[in-house]
Amino acid sequence: MEKRDELITIIMPVYNVKEYISACVDSVINQTYRYFELILVDDGSTDKSGTICDEYAQKDSRISAIHKENGGVSDARNIAIPLAKGNYICFVDPDDILAPTYLQKLHETMIESGADLVACNYHSFYDGDVIPEDIGKGTHETLVITEKEMEDEAFAAEYTVRMVIPINKMYKRCIFDKIKYPVGKIHEDAYVYHHMLHEVQKVVYISDILYYYRLRKNSITNSGFKIKELEDSMGAVIDRIDFYHGLGKQRLTDIAIDGYLYFLWRNIDIMKKEGIKDYKELIKPYIRIFRNKIRYLKVSKDYPLKKLLKMYYIAYLKTDY
């Protein structure tokens, strides 16, 4: 095996996380797999995060620090990817923690299975919680996802979050020869996942809990409803519908349209809970889009006439949103 095949590039966008970044970088340094490089991308931090990045880069030759104007997590990843020297890439958020065997187990699975993408399970913890020492211990299960299953079943509720988020995975670097993260989107991962599945041949999911995801009150994903949240979450599913329809993949188009309705209901529910009084006005454009997209549906053994008629009822006759 050549050196490049062994090297793993870890890309970490950094923005105003001075309280957390040291614990995260230390969890990278303490990996049992030692042959890695860590690219810290300081995305215009206004606290001491950039200085901390420089301090780590000076102490460890495997670590480099880049400083740029604030452009968001997608922009930070896009800038770092062409600089990656490894044949494999992992994305890590600077307020999270890696299990010591994170790189080792993902890399071993990648090599043994011949996969293009390997995902692991993760544990969410609230800021201030102590991660149990025995977390993740237990049965090791491996799910090999074939080409059909990748695009057909990976969007099922059981796996969709685990598979769409970018942080619990190891990717072959070549995947990003054709794919870039959309800049300025909250749900940037949801915009690229279906494109990624189309590019790869094999995905492996392992049940080991190797990534610890910190929940913070002021983080993007935990800061309450925003109109941009509605726009970006629905925009990602619209992109997925159009992508599969353009490829002529009817079953995947059906699944994507079902997903559109799921996220529409989800956004309506969130707005109701947060007391957004004009939520019906906010969803009107998305109801119109829904009416346009259901024209792509066709009756089949997987999509019976009864279900198709229900979709048209929701689009044109239902009023109690």
Image: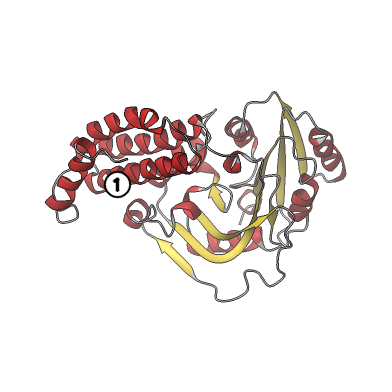
Element at label 1: helix
Which residue bears the numbered disc 1?
Answer: 258
Q: Image check: 68 left or right of 299? A: right
Relative depth, front residue between 6 and 90: 90
Counting other residues with Cα less than 10 Å from the Cα at mark 1, is it few (<14), some (14-19), or many (20 or more)?
Answer: some
Tell me the kind of residue under disc 1.
Asp
Quarter of image, res 312? top left
Residue 47 locus on image (x, y percent): 80, 32
Q: Position of residue 8 (x, y in %)?
A: 65, 50
Q: Residue at x 67, y 55 (%)?
A: 126
The residue positioned 66% from the left and 40% from the top of the image is 218
- What colour scheme does the image use? secondary structure
Q: Is residue 195 visible?
A: no
191 up-or-down from 204: above or below: above
Q: How many numbered marks appear?
A: 1
Q: Position of residue 269 (x, y in %)?
A: 42, 44
Residue 250 position, x and y percent, is 22, 45
